[in-house]
Image: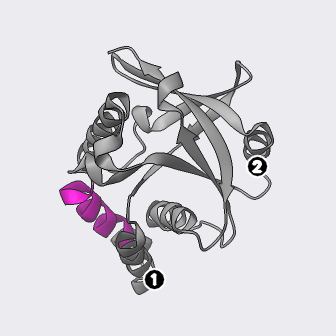
Amino acid sequence: MKNDQRPELCLRFLGWQCRVRQYAVRRQAGRPPEGARASVRLGGEAAGQINTVMYKLDPERITAEFRFMVQKSNDPRAVYENALGLLGEHYYQVPAEFDDRITALFSLDSDLAGRLLAAERCTLDFCQGAQEFTLTCAVRGCEPGSAEYEATYWHNHLFNPNLPGRVRVVLFETDWDRSGSNG
């Protein structure tokens, strides 16, 4: 969806997510913030929690940079520190640069990923402090090599040097007309 066509709720969510994530990178050593962790509901029932990834509308350049950072060093600490620098400086500065779809990474044998993909729809509840968003989403898997898969994989690899070569990436596309927030 083009920036000028995005619903107001979408723009508020992206702005909030960028603020929450940038704060975490700068003040919490990059640990996933509470607001980036969604509670998943399938058919109205609690199904678990997931850490989500935001990716840029045109992710190829930054994904290549993430990949290069991981592959150029054998020192996981150096990769981690470089990632904090990159993400803390400017990555989250412009919410309009982000796709309004989000992703999550799972192991290949993840029960929750399988249930999400089978259901094809879910609700994601995001909450941090007094702010809450409830997103009704369509769910689909991302193929290895797709822009969404690669962006998610290499973003996660910056912080997890033990990430296996094969994972499952799930994409969540929000139905903004059926979603809401408390503010």
Q: For residue 159, what is the image quadrant? A: bottom left
The CA span between labels 1 and 2 is 26 Å
Amino acid type indicated by mark 1: Gln
Query: Is residue 50 left or right of 179 when viewed as pictured?
Result: right
Decide whether residue 90 is among the magenta residues. yes
Main SS, magenta region, reads helix
Residue at the spot of label 1: 71
Residue drawn where x is 58% and y is 44% of the image: 172
Q: For residue 73, what is the image quadrant? A: bottom left
**17 in relation to 179, above or below:** below
Q: Disc number at residue 46?
A: none
Q: Residues within 10 Å of mark 2 (few under 14, many from 20)?
A: few
Magenta stretch, residue numbers: 79-91
Helix, strand or loop at mark 1: helix
Amino acid type indicated by mark 2: Ser
Helix, strand or loop at mark 2: loop
Query: Is residue 20 left or right of 176 when viewed as pictured?
Result: left
**Quadrant location of the C terminus in the rendered image:** top left
Q: Disc number at residue 110?
A: 2
